[in-house]
Amino acid sequence: MVKKYGDIIKFERQDYCGAIILDNAEKLNVVGDEFLNELGALQQEILTMEDLRALAIVANGDNFSAGIDLKFLQEVSSEKVKATLTWLQGLYSFWQTLSIPVVIGVQGFCFGSAVELMLGCDIRIAAENLRLSLPEVKLGLSPDMGGTTRLTKLVGTGQAKRLIMVCEEIGAHEALQIGLVEKVVPVEKLREATIRLAQRMSGFPPSSIAFAKKGINLAEESSVTAGLLFEQAQSTYCCGTKDIKEAISAFFDKRKPSFTGN
């Protein structure tokens, strides 16, 4: 299944795994009104896909995205930001709050708003040619779609200040070193590695991977006591599902399990 949501975003699906593809390579997959509206439409449809179990995000072309379209910034105003920013922030928070895992693969230029999109995902894979930067401060503003918030939690205060306040550009291996990406692969292997990882997780029991994601997100934002209470609740639920019995039976029978989410 291949579906386009306009001129910029494509969605492909194989079994339980979906792939979102940025498809505006000739314009460096820049982020503007059209991109954001297409993304919002796709996200609303994703919410109706009850049997979708994992997502991959990749981009066609040599570069993932050059970030915000400067023409978009030329037309922006405080009034427009006040009216739309909650919605805009929700587009990138969507990946974090979604119950299924989201893997993103980035290559070439990954600037500004594209970095913020990537920060909301669960696992980030970088091609060896990655050039990553948050240049907003040079343009007279500060990251406003999760950059100052999620980047700080991910890499720490000092590295976040260096990347955001100094506007330093870093490569794939430095991004790996500071914890901004989880894996680096050759350019030609990026799409395969990203989709393969999403497909692997789509084969796990839906409840257990959803609880794992929620538990990790909760641990980042709450106390140890709250996290342990969540673990108690999810364990109580999971140990009563048909999927846990199917997983164990398949292991002993030496066959591929078939999970239903129940």
Image: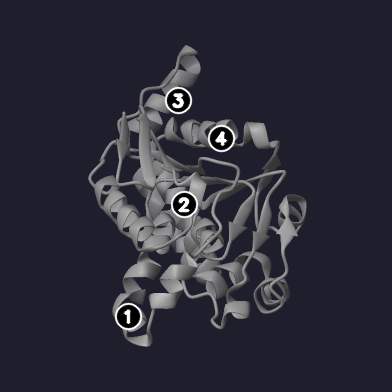
Return the residue at label 3.
248
Return the residue at label 4: 191
Amino acid type assigned to the residue bearing label 4 in the image: Arg
| Residue at the farthest bottom position | 78
Is disc 4 surrounded by few (<14), some (14 to 19) or many (20+) residues within 10 Å?
many
What residue does disc 1 label?
Answer: 80
Mark 1, other Cα within 10 Å: few <14 / some 14–19 / many ≥20:
few
Whole-Å distance between the Cαs marked 3 and 2? 22 Å
Query: Could you tell me residue 158's position as x and y percent?
Result: 73, 76
Label 1 sits on a secondary structure element that is helix
Tell which tag, 4 or 2, sits nearer the viewer. 4
Circle nearer the N terminus (1, 4): 1
Earlier residue among tags 3 and 2:
2
Mark 1 near mark 4, Cβ–Cβ under 8 Å? Answer: no
Task: Identify the residue position indicated by label 2 in the image.
Answer: 213
Tell me the distance, in whole angstroms, between the alpha carbons under discs 2 and 1. 34 Å
